[in-house]
Image (spheres, helix red, strand yellow):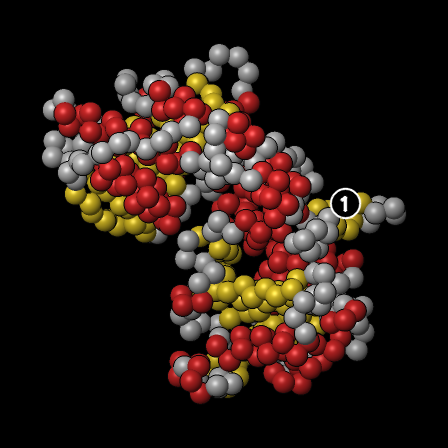
Amino acid sequence: MPGPVLYPYQQRWLEDDSRFKIGMMSRQIGKTFTTTLEIALDMVAAEMEGRRTRWVILSRGERQAREAMEEGVKLHLHAMGAAFQGAEDVFHLEDRTTVRALEVSMAHGSRVTALPANPDTARGFSANVFLDEFAFHADSRKIWAALFPVISKPGLKLRIVSTPNGKGNKFYDLMTADGDTGWSRHTVDIYQAVADGLDRPIEDLKKSCGDPDAWAQEYELQWLDEASAWLSFDLINAAEHDRAGIPENYTGGPVYVGVDIGRRHDLFVIWVVEEVGDVLWTREIVERRGATFAEQDALLDDVFARYRVLRCCMDQTGMGEKPVEDAQNRHGSSRVEGVLFTGPNKLALATLGKQAFEDRRIRIPMSNEPLRRDLHKLQKVSGPTGAPRFVAESDSGGHADRAWACFLAVSAAASPHMEYGYAPARPEAGGLYRGPHRMRMRPDFDDEDFPPRSVLGFKPGAW
């Protein structure tokens, strides 16, 4: 059976047998495919020589680890006609979390294991290692500190590939370090890949991307300065989780909702979080562009029907006045709170939201690039009088609409609470919503300039 057709940049990477090899490569050019081919070839060569080889693939999440195994290693071994066995296992880490690992083994004991990257998983193996999309790993420096002693044994190899993800991670350090570092470095942007024969319509991709910064970083491999970003990519990476953003994972717990109003150019966003212990798990993000107010009302009502919503904070600024008033009439003013986006209120919202990211109290969907860009584009700058204000360059993704919806949901979860009785808007929404539950509320204020209690971050029992 003929082998895969490799482009020159892939051949250069595959033929480089350096012990420490790192590649900064554009999106959509097959960097994981090529590196998993190197692993599969090493396993087959070891089997033919009667020896054993051991590889570990550390990916940014469980889904990416599965893709590297299923669409990489296994695919290549099948193509080469190699016999192997597959298995799954669950690892229990020191922080009491569990991760799922996939493994492929061969007759003479050669094995490859793919699992999510974590300082504990990085420390647990003595093997050749492939760090896939390393710039996007949460705690990349802690992972590096745990990993490097593991691969210090003579003969073990380390492979790293990624697109850039700002300057605040270990991948940036490794790619930009001066002098003889012992690393073999490869750089392939989208233009080099196409020049080497890859069939990609560059102008169409650039136009559909619609974000100059995203194009510069993910395709042209430029390092973006994070100095002014309110949420760094490191904070965003640490909050991402494979199981976030999936409505079916809702466990019936208390839910808090943030709503950013948009009618024409900007997005209308509903951000839904469930409180599990002390962590806010994103269960769903509803996004619409150009939706009528009637459609927005219906979307919000559907969220209230499917989840046990204790509190909802909505953007009341400008066109938000009527949607907030209508939502309060339908769901109660004690459950729906309007938030005016004044300077002090936005600072309080953004600060509360950032604290949730810094304290690892929020989980967001993984590999959602429009969401990542929206969270990262928000910047804190000083106004003419020196007062802080938040800006986000408007583009096809709006004015950081997803970020503000997220911060509103976090604010809703920070309010005091009381007991109340609740039944779902639709009986079919599920029996586990019935009965007395805890609800967060505040007294009404006549002064619209006074920051809402949820924005101020009051804790339960404060009043």
Residue depicted at 47% across the width and 51% down the height: 366
Left or right, residue 78 beside residue 461: left
Q: Residue 130, position in %: x, y?
A: 35, 32
Left or right, residue 55 beside residue 354: left
Identify the residue at horizontal 28%, vertical 17% (top origin).
154
The answer to whether any part of residue 123 appears in the image is: no
Residue 416 to residue 352: above or below: below
Image coordinates for residue 74, horizontal then vertical, percent: 26, 41
Q: In the image, what residue occupies the spot 27% across and 18% down?
A: 155
Work out whether 145 lies above or below 155. Answer: below
- Secondary element type, mark 1: strand
Q: In this view, does 418 lie above or below 136?
A: below
Q: In the shown orientation, is residue 346 left or right of residue 146?
A: right
Residue 191 vs residue 343, the one in the foreground: 191
Neighbours of disc 1 within 10 Å: few (<14), some (14-19), many (20+): some
Three-letter amino acid code at disc 1? Val
Residue 187 lies, in percent from the top left, at 51, 25
In the rendered image, the quadrant that contains the N terminus is top left
Residue placed at 70% from the left, 51% from the top? 395
Quarter of the image for residue 295 reads bottom right
Residue highlighted by disc 1: 381
